[in-house]
Image (cartoon, rainbow, N blue to C red):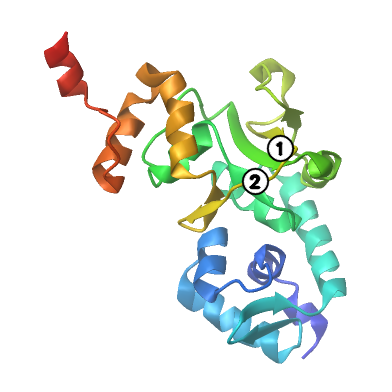
Amino acid sequence: MATTEFMNPTAARIVLAAQRGDSINRISNKIGTSYSWVYDWINRLDDAEIISNTDNGVRVRDYEMRRRYEEMMGTLYTRDEVSQEDGYVIPHFAGMEFAYTEIDAAHVWTHGGFQIARSHDDYPIFIEVHDRDVDRWIEFFEQFGVDTSVGERPDAADVDGSVHYVLFPQAEGIDVEWVDGNPVIPLDDAVSQMMETRPAYEPALEMIADEHDVDIDASHHDQMAAD
């Protein structure tokens, strides 16, 4: 089949998001696309020798096609403003390790049930990255027309578009757990961050306490009784 038949956004997302050893289910979760649709495309991409799907998981075979996919998606995303949904997909295309942190650690660990201090017009996404990769991350996000800051959230007036990324460089390493296809800092670390400004994160702490059986005394009712 002609290569042009595979210049499709779904195929591009699959190939760009795939890391060696990923399952079809993990790729499906990463890009927010149904398992059956991703399964069908992976079979087609496997037949075309763009990827391989084996008992050890998926891996990319044709890196020239991967490069073409990255260029194509960069063009698509810079044409229109990046949505919040796509804001969580794009980092998977970078091929570099990362983990959601800060507000997004709470967001991921509550399965999207908690939001705070973000709006439609100002939507920072917070990720831990390796210190050595910071410049590469900035260049990567530039391809998609998205602003990046390092270490702290910028004023909304200083950012173009609503979605932007805040990088937290790590010199030692990144501890990653996977939740709903998203790499996130470990639960204990996420809870420790939330406890630093507990009143703001109380609803998230309640949800985490209920789901994960974590003893963090995160109950509005208990606090009210104590008061």
Residue for point 55% across, 74% down: 23
Relative depth, front residue between 188 and 34: 188
Identify which amino acid the numbered label 1 is placed on: Gln
| Label 2: how many Cα within 10 Å (few below 14, some 14–19, many 20+) | some
Q: Position of residue 49 (x, y in %)?
A: 76, 87
Residue for point 60% across, 49% down: 86
Identify which amino acid the numbered label 2 is placed on: Ile
Instruction: Look at the image and tell me in which quarter the N terminus lies.
Output: bottom right
Residue for point 60% across, 71% down: 22
Relative depth, front residue between 157 and 99: 99
Which residue has dot 1 on it? Answer: 170
As helix, strand or loop, the secondary structure at mark 1 comes to: strand
Which residue has dot 2 on it? Answer: 174
Instruction: Look at the image and tell me in which quarter the C terminus lies.
Output: top left
Q: Are marks 2 and 1 in contact (CB under 8 Å)?
A: yes
Residue that protrudes farthest toward the front in the picture:
172
Relative depth, front residue between 79 and 66: 66
Q: Position of residue 50 (x, y in %)?
A: 76, 81
Residue 142 showing in the rendered view: no
Q: Toward which corner of the image does residue 15 lie, by quadrant? A: bottom right
Q: Is residue 144 left or right of residue 39?
A: right
Tally of numbered tags: 2
| Label 1: how many Cα within 10 Å (few below 14, some 14–19, many 20+) | some
Distance (Cα) linking label 2 and label 1: 7 Å
